[in-house]
């Protein structure tokens, strides 16, 4: 499907046409998010590669924005986060190791002064984590 505009003069003339580099980021972002497999977005990207069309560009950018809003409202709790610097996750109360980097993951006792929420499925280790935190706090107090 090629997008045709009902408005006049929506196709930019050659001097005003954005350079291919301007759209390479758009292509990469669509590919990273898996949008280029959506037929409407794919057609819009193809149209932009042939000639500039404001409506195609806006369609793609609006779809990316809607994905951003969706990610903010419904974050994936299992998204990959792989800290690589010890300063990102250090704290004197050790909770374990970060997968794939073997960095120790810990929290500061000050983080426990207000609230603590430990969530997980049955048998997921919630009680073990809380016992570990309490044990380390007691050990610190006796030292």
Image (tube, helix red, strand yellow):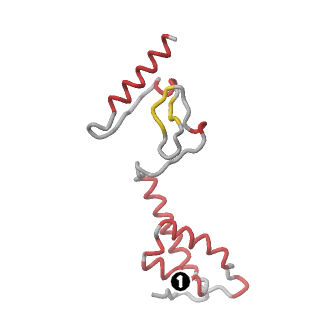
Disc 1 target residue: 46
Residue 69 % position (x, y): 46, 58
Residue 94 % position (x, y): 48, 29
Residue 4 % position (x, y): 50, 88
Say which element carries label 1: helix
| Quarter containing the N terminus | bottom left
Position of 55 compared to 15: left or right?
left
Considering depth in this image, is 132 or 42 the residue closer to the camera?
132
Residue 87 against residue 58 in the figure, above or below: above
Considering depth in this image, is 1 or 108 the residue closer to the camera?
108
Residue ranking furthest to the left: 122
Residue at point 36% right, 24% down? 131
Position of 13 compared to 29: left or right?
right
Residue at point 46% right, 19% down? 137
Residue at point 52% right, 40% down? 102
Residue 58 % position (x, y): 54, 74
Count of numbered badges drawn on the protein: 1
Q: Which picture quadrant has residue 25?
A: bottom right
């Amino acid at each position: 499907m090629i997008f045709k505009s009902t408005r006049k003069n929506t196709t930019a003339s050659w001097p005003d046409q954005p350079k291919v580099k301007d759209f390479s980021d758009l292509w990469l972002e669509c590919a990273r998010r898996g949008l280029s497999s959506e037929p409407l977005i794919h057609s819009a990207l193809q149209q932009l590669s042939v000639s500039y069309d404001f409506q195609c560009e806006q369609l793609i950018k609006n779809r990316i924005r809607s994905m951003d809003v969706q990610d903010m409202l419904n974050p994936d709790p299992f998204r990959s986060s792989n800290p690589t610097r010890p300063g990102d996750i250090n704290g004197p109360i050790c909770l374990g190791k970060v997968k794939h980097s073997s960095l120790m993951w810990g929290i500061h006792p000050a983080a426990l002064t207000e609230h603590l929420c430990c969530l997980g499925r049955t048998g997921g280790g919630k009680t073990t984590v809380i016992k570990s935190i309490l044990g380390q706090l007691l050990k610190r107090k006796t030292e």
